[in-house]
Image: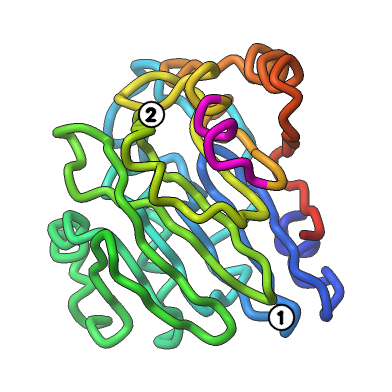
């Protein structure tokens, strides 16, 4: 068993835990022990299918797809570092885990022959809400450009905590006005490539919606994805905004 699975399984009940799996992947463990995954990239499928053009995995593989049984797995859009085609089939093979994915993931589901699991699969769009155990999952607008026009952001409410994973998106302050102002955590990309927010954009979003904590993601996995976490940290300090830089494999209590 790899080390992230051990950390998740042994995290004490009665508290709400957040774990970083690297890239844009996060795991929430509820106080009751339920598990929710968002955008896990566990394999090396991007390099295998896209070639080594800056897409070689630079962060270690710290979780195997059969090591944890999730109550729900979310894929915010069909890019392979968010819908891991080598991992998703194994993640839902237990016939229990719910797969919640943006509507433009349906082609990947069909290509992988996952229609057998249709009762476990729900295609989602902004303004949709899904309840899985203790988790209330609200899907919100996300602007990832023409390459993933149906991408979604995610607001997860559990144990009285509220976590917003912005998904792969550019900075859209016009849309952010409608976001909740009682967020415990904001998670957003800082790589500034492929239509994503950069190190300066995420602090602007944090300044507008004022979460209790902001966590940057989408850096360090691929050379082509860029992302200067030090620059992000400096800007957040200048703005006197709270942030936390999670190491891959790290868990925190919310």
In the rendered structure, the answer to whether residue 132 lies left or right of residue 6 reads: left
Residue 137: percent from left, percent from top: 45, 70
Instruction: Compute the Cα span from label 2 to label 1.
Output: 34 Å
Seen at 33% across and 43% down, the residue is: 80
* 246 vs 110, nearest the viewer: 246
x and y percentages locating residue 78 in the rendered image: 26, 49
Q: Which residue is drawn at 14% across and 33% down?
A: 146
Drawn side of residue 23 relative to residue 5, left or right: left
Q: Residues within 10 Å of mark 1 (few under 14, many from 20)?
A: many
Task: Determine whether, in the image, residue 140 is placed left or right of residue 36.
Answer: left
Residue at image mark 1? 33
Q: Nearer the viewer, residue 37 or 3?
A: 37
Q: In the rendered view, tell whether residue 217 sits above or below residue 204.
A: below
The reply to whether dot 2 and dot 1 touch (C-beta < 8 Å) is no
Label for residue 23?
A: none
Question: Would you identify the image quadrant in which residue 103 lies?
Answer: bottom left
Q: In which quarter of the image is the C terminus?
A: bottom right
Principal secondary structure, stretch drawn in magenta: helix
Packing grade of label 2 (10 A; few <14, some 14-19, many >=20) is: many
Name the residue carrying label 2.
171
Q: Position of residue 232 (x, y in %)?
A: 63, 19
Q: Please, what secondary structure does the residue beneath circle 1 have?
A: loop
In this rendering, position of residue 106 left or right of residue 16: left
Q: Give the range drawn in magenta.
A: 204-211
Instruction: Please state the total of marks drawn on the protein image.
Output: 2
Q: Quadrant of the N terminus?
A: bottom right
Colour scheme employed for the rendering of this structure: rainbow
The answer to which quarter of the image holds residue 171 is: top left
Asked if residue 215 is among those painted magenta in the image, a careful observer would answer no
The answer to whether any part of residue 85 appears in the image is no
Mark 2 / mark 1, whichever is N-terminal: 1
């Amino acid at each position: 068993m790899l080390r992230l699975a051990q950390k998740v399984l042994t995290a004490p009940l009665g508290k709400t835990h957040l774990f970083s799996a690297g890239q844009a992947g996060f795991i929430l463990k509820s106080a009751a022990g339920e598990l929710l995954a968002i955008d896990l990239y566990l394999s090396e499928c991007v390099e295998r299918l896209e070639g080594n053009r800056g897409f070689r995995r630079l962060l270690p593989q710290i979780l195997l797809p059969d090591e944890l049984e999730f109550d729900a797995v979310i894929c915010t859009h069909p890019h392979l570092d968010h819908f891991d085609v080598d991992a998703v089939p194994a993640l839902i093979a237990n016939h229990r885990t719910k797969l919640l994915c943006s509507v433009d993931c349906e082609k990947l589901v069909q290509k992988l022959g996952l229609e057998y699991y249709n009762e476990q699969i729900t295609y989602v769009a902004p303004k949709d809400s899904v309840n899985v155990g203790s988790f209330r999952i609200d899907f919100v607008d996300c602007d990832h450009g023409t390459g993933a026009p149906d991408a979604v952001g995610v607001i997860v409410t559990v144990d009285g905590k509220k976590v917003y994973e912005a998904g792969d998106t550019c900075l859209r302050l016009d849309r952010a006005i409608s976001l909740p102002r009682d967020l415990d955590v904001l998670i957003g990309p800082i790589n500034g490539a492929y239509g994503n927010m950069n190190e300066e954009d995420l602090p602007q979003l944090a300044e507008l919606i004022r979460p209790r904590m902001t966590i940057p993601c989408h850096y360090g996995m691929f050379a082509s994805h860029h992302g200067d976490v030090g620059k992000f940290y400096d800007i957040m300090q200048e703005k006197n905004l709270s942030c936390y830089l999670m190491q891959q494999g790290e868990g925190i209590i919310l």
